[in-house]
Image (cartoon, rainbow, N blue to C red):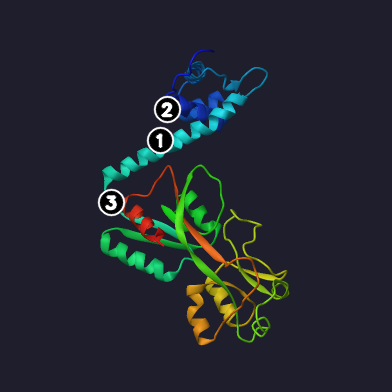
């Protein structure tokens, strides 16, 4: 194998990826509906064109990726995903508007922003049905990855996945609050972080397994985990603990004295960033893209 590498075909890359996914030439042949000899021939040609050996075949029952094979794998997947995305976008352009748009948004997204975007969507696309889900933390991204939503507006979830395309979508300020008669609310001046740790903190938890075992903004050694932001709000009003809430959601409570803002001494102002997420291989159609861009506006 020598000389300049020659570009592989998309079919050759699909065969290469099928072998890696299934673990054998025979299994890849069954998946693709080809003869095993065709699979072997295609891989031999691919290796010849690239000038590298992709699989180690001797002394093993199943083909094992060589170091060069591992190096080629990530780029092959990226090309396949990009091609799937191109074809999906082309299908969307030729088929016109979607019959329905499904989206999932983080529970922290201000309701005012969501309602305004959906009202504009209703007026702009009156014939397109809408399916909306509200989730917390990793459940937003999980719904997108599983195909249950065309796109999502997610919170600060760091998840490395080649299938996901992400973009900025603004943020919301968080404020630590408690009922007026809560011990932390009765302390004069700013609240030391050590003092906050000694009191029950109400924490929003994740319904997905993407962030299992991870904590977000937890200070207290004692905490109650709640999967519903409305339930957390109700427990805060009842004085059963303290916790961080989106500032727009508790604005009226602070104004009317039902809740008190706690000046907990932590570095920087608590901010909850949002970002758009969608699968690269199934990008949103025209109506969904319009709505995603509208929701991403600060």
Q: Can you say which quadrant of the picture contains the N terminus?
A: top right
* Image spot of residue 180 (x, y percent): 61, 86
Is the residue under label 3 in contact with that under label 1 (CB below 8 Å)?
A: no
Q: Is residue 51 left or right of residue 97?
A: right
Residue count near mark 1 (Cα–Cα under 10 Å), binned few <14, some 14–19, many ≥20: some
Horizontal side of residue 2 vs 10, given as left or right: right
Q: Residue at x 45, y 33 (%)?
A: 79
Pick the front one: 52 or 39: 52
**Label 1 sits on residue:** 83
Q: Residue at x 57, y 57 (%)?
A: 208
Q: Residue at x 67, y 81 (%)?
A: 184
Q: Earlier in the sequence, mark 1 or mark 3?
A: 1
The image quadrant that residue 218 belongs to is: bottom right
Q: Position of residue 90 (x, y in %)?
A: 32, 40
Quarter of the image holding residue 197?
bottom right
Q: Residues within 10 Å of mark 2 (few under 14, many from 20)?
A: few
Which element type, helix, strand or loop, lies under badge 3? Answer: loop
Label whose residue precedes the other's in the sequence (2 or 3): 2
Q: Which residue is mark 3?
A: 97
Report the Cα–Cα distance between label 2 and label 3.
29 Å
- Label number found at residue 10: 2
First in sequence, mark 1 or 2: give its number.
2
Percent x, y for residue 142? 52, 53
Q: Residues within 10 Å of mark 3 (few under 14, many from 20)?
A: some
Report how far apart the C-alphas of labels 1 and 3 lie in the structure. 21 Å
């Amino acid at each position: 194998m020598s000389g300049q590498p020659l570009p592989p075909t998309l079919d050759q890359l699909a065969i290469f990826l099928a072998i890696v996914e299934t673990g054998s030439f025979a299994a890849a042949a069954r998946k693709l509906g080809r003869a095993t000899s065709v699979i072997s021939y295609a891989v031999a040609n691919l290796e010849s064109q690239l000038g590298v050996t992709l699989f180690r075949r001797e002394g093993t029952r199943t083909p094992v990726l060589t170091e060069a094979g591992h190096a080629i794998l990530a780029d092959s997947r990226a090309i396949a995903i990009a091609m799937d995305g191109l074809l999906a976008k082309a299908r969307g352009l030729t088929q016109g508007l979607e019959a329905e748009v499904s989206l999932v948004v983080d529970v922290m997204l201000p309701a005012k922003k969501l309602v305004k975007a959906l009202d504009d969507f209703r007026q702009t696309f009156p014939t397109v049905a809408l399916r909306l889900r509200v989730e917390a933390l990793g459940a937003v991204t999980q719904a997108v990855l599983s195909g249950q939503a065309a796109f999502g507006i997610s919170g600060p979830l760091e998840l490395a996945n080649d299938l996901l395309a992400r973009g900025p979508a603004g943020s919301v300020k968080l404020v630590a609050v408690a009922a007026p008669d809560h011990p932390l609310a009765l302390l004069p001046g700013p609240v030391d972080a050590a003092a906050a740790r000694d009191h029950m903190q109400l924490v929003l938890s994740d319904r997905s397994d993407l962030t299992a075992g991870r904590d977000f903004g937890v200070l207290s050694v004692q905490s109650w985990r709640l999967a519903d932001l409305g339930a957390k709000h109700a427990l805060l009003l009842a004085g059963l603990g303290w916790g961080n809430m989106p500032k727009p959601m508790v604005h009226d409570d602070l104004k009317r004295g039902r809740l008190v803002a706690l000046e907990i001494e932590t570095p920087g102002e608590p901010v909850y960033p949002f970002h758009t997420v969608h699968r690269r291989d199934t990008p949103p159609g025209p109506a969904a893209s319009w709505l995603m861009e509208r929701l991403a506006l600060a």
